[in-house]
């Protein structure tokens, strides 16, 4: 599988990663190499084989819908890079008209 | 014998008998850490003063009352991807360099209930992604047996700390071999429990369908004791199994392998396996036979597929798990960004190292529209085949024995430029995570260059007792674990 610089740019955008020109080159080369190895999986016939997402085979685990103690606000905000009142502050998202 | 050389079980006996105080224990370890840590670099964070204070409090509280729990007063090191309340948890990443968890991981809380003593947090490959600790943002740890060699990874700091007697035992995590491989490289015991045996709550997530927490210890009885302390159901982890926890120490009473059939999979002894490693593991298999085990040749035909399957599934899960590092709620936030998207992009660029970025890219690629079926879907289907191979094998045998790694510890820098070569060195450990099985790494010899070699025993799901029993019988008859490195 040949991964192009354009592919790398597209994937980086999806992954919300800013990549430098040098990183772009390196990732294109390395991802091509790794994905070529991954393509050896084609030799295994998986017709009619169910995919495995978890080995446990359990689907949902329920509990009673009862309020339980949770992280207090001050503790939850203690690691915030920036806060405002009882919330996390981020750059403005909505443009002013 | 100097306190720092004792096993967990022996130190615990001494402490319970009142022959030594918690303060004396912590002082002995502080002294040892002072002697070797500048060479080994096992720790990311040390908390000597807090440990001493805790020990002093414990001694006062226990005065005249020595009926303690197994981990009471025992000085442990914890891998730095397990949350410890009010002690930094960095994952060896710039992203979390300033992060102080507001709560304990469940495994840590369980140890705290027993009044264990935390000595510090150990180094790892950033976010547990790697096989050498060279991907730590704070520099690599060293192998105590040869400081030019890697200690393995990702739990390299934990394994090196145990091997160099810088703690009595440690916790690691294992997603594709991250407990067993460093244990083998450092000549100590490492146990990856069955998926679901130990809670993952508070373990910083890498690949959620593969991650497990487990002990790294000086010998097998120590591993049994520590596993017993951390295992069990946790309502905070819906993937933790609601099964009773057996007394793992009791499982060690049978000192043989009578009535056990041990499978030797041909696929693990092929091209690429170092001859010294092969010899040591073959000799170990002979010993298992002498101990009463029935040796049987078996096949795990899809072994070759494991690396490819793993590096698709693990990176796909990682790309999703690491989406949380966005600079908003905790961790690093890039400065001077023009809008929210820019904040995400720059924060992640500055916070993640090259290997983490590479894996996020690979995982995002494998999950992206147009490639999902070809990569992620295919990998999940082949994962089913790998599980089937193990199921078929365990219809015939009770245990499987293999090497842990194709070679003894490699040198620093030897593989860091070639990601695929580094990934391929995980060949013997990752299929076990894909199948969710328990496995233990036990020392089984040394190379001519004096580097430790490990043997891996794999068991049926939730049959850690059989693993521990066989590993213990072997350990008792060989004594490889008694040899200690001279750190220089």
Image (cartoon, rainbow, N blue to C red):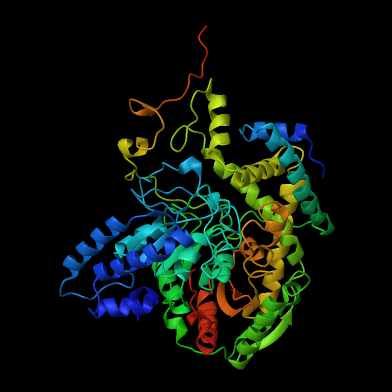
Rendered location of residue B115, percent (x, y): 29, 64
Q: Is residue B143 above or below residue B293?
A: above
Q: Is residue B244 visible in the rendered structure shown here?
A: no
Rendered location of residue B73, percent (x, y): 29, 68
Q: Nearer the viewer, residue B172 or B25?
A: B25
Q: Is residue B462 visible in the rendered structure shown here?
A: yes
Q: Residue furthest front?
A: B488
Q: Residue furthest top?
A: A97
- The answer to whether residue B133 is left or right of residue B379 is left
- The answer to whether residue B314 is left or right of residue B196 is right
Q: Nearer the viewer, residue B93 or B259?
A: B93
Q: Nearer the viewer, residue B228 or B123?
A: B123
The quarter of the picture where residue A73 lies is top left
The number of discs equals: 0
- The answer to whether residue B6 is left or right of residue B64 is right
Rendered location of residue B365, percent (x, y): 71, 41
Q: Is residue B285 above or below residue B233?
A: below
| Quadrant showing the N terminus of chain B | bottom left
The quarter of the picture where residue B368 lies is top right
Residue in view at x 69 percent, y 75 percent: B393
Rendered location of residue B307, percent (x, y): 71, 59
Residue in view at x 64 percent, y 83 percent: B262
Residue in view at x 61 percent, y 89 percent: B287
Q: Is residue A96 above or below residue B201?
A: above
């Amino acid at each position: 599988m040949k991964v192009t610089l354009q592919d790398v740019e597209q994937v980086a955008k999806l992954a919300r990663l800013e990549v430098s020109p040098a990183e772009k080159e390196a990732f294109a080369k390395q991802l091509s190499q790794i994905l070529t190895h991954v393509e050896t999986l084609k030799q295994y016939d998986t017709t009619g084989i169910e995919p495995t997402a978890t080995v446990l085979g359990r689907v949902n685990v329920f509990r009673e819908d009862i309020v339980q103690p949770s992280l207090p606000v001050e503790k939850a905000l203690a690691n915030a890079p920036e806060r405002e009142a009882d919330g996390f502050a981020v750059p403005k998202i909505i443009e002013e008209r | 014998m100097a306190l720092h050389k004792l096993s967990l079980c022996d130190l615990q006996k001494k402490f319970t008998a009142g022959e030594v105080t918690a303060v004396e224990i912590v002082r002995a370890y502080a002294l040892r850490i002072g002697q070797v840590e500048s060479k080994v670099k096992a720790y990311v964070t040390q908390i000597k003063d807090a440990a001493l204070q805790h020990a002093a409090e414990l001694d006062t509280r226990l005065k005249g009352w020595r009926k303690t729990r197994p981990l009471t007063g025992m000085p442990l090191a914890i891998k730095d991807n397990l949350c410890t309340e009010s002690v930094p948890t960095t994952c060896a990443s710039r992203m979390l360099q300033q992060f102080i968890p507001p709560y304990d991981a469940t495994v840590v809380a369980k140890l705290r209930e027993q009044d264990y003593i935390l000595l510090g947090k150990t180094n790892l490959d950033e976010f547990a992604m790697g096989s050498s600790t060279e991907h730590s943002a704070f520099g690599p740890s060293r192998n105590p047996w040869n400081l030019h060699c890697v200690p393995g990874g990702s739990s390299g700091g934990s394994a090196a700390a145990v091997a160099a007697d810088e703690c009595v035992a440690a916790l690691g995590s294992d997603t594709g071999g991250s407990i067993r491989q460093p244990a083998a490289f450092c000549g100590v015991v490492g146990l990856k429990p069955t998926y679901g045996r130990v809670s993952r709550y508070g373990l910083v997530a890498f690949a959620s369908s593969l991650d497990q927490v487990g002990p790294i210890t000086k010998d097998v009885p120590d591993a049994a004791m520590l596993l017993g302390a951390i295992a069990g159901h946790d309502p905070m982890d819906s993937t933790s199994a609601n099964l009773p926890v057996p007394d793992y120490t009791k499982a060690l009473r049978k000192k043989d392998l009578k009535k056990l059939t041990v499978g030797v999979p041909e696929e693990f002894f092929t091209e690429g396996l170092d001859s010294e490693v092969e010899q040591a593991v073959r000799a170990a298999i002979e010993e298992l036979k002498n101990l009463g085990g029935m040796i049987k040749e078996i096949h795990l035909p899809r072994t070759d597929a494991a690396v490819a399957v793993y590096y698709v599934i693990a990176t796909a899960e990682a790309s999703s798990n690491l989406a949380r590092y966005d600079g908003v709620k905790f961790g690093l936030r890039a400065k001077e960004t023009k809008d929210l998207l820019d904040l995400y992009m720059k924060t992640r660029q500055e916070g993640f190292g090259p290997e983490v970025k590479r894996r996020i890219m690979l995982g995002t690629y494998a999950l992206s529209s147009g490639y999902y079926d070809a990569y992620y879907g295919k990998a999940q289907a082949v994962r089913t085949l790998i599980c089937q191979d193990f199921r078929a094998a365990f219809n015939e045998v009770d245990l499987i024995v293999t090497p842990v790694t194709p070679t003894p510890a490699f040198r620093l820098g030897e593989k860091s430029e070639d990601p695929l070569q580094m990934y391929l060195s995980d060949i013997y450990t990752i299929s076990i995570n894909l199948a969710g099985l328990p496995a233990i790494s036990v020392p089984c010899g040394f190379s001519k260059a004096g580097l430790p070699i490990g043997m891996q025993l794999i068991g049926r799901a939730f049959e850690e007792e059989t693993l521990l029993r066989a590993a213990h019988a072997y350990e008792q008859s060989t004594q490889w674990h008694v040899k200690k490195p001279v750190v220089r």
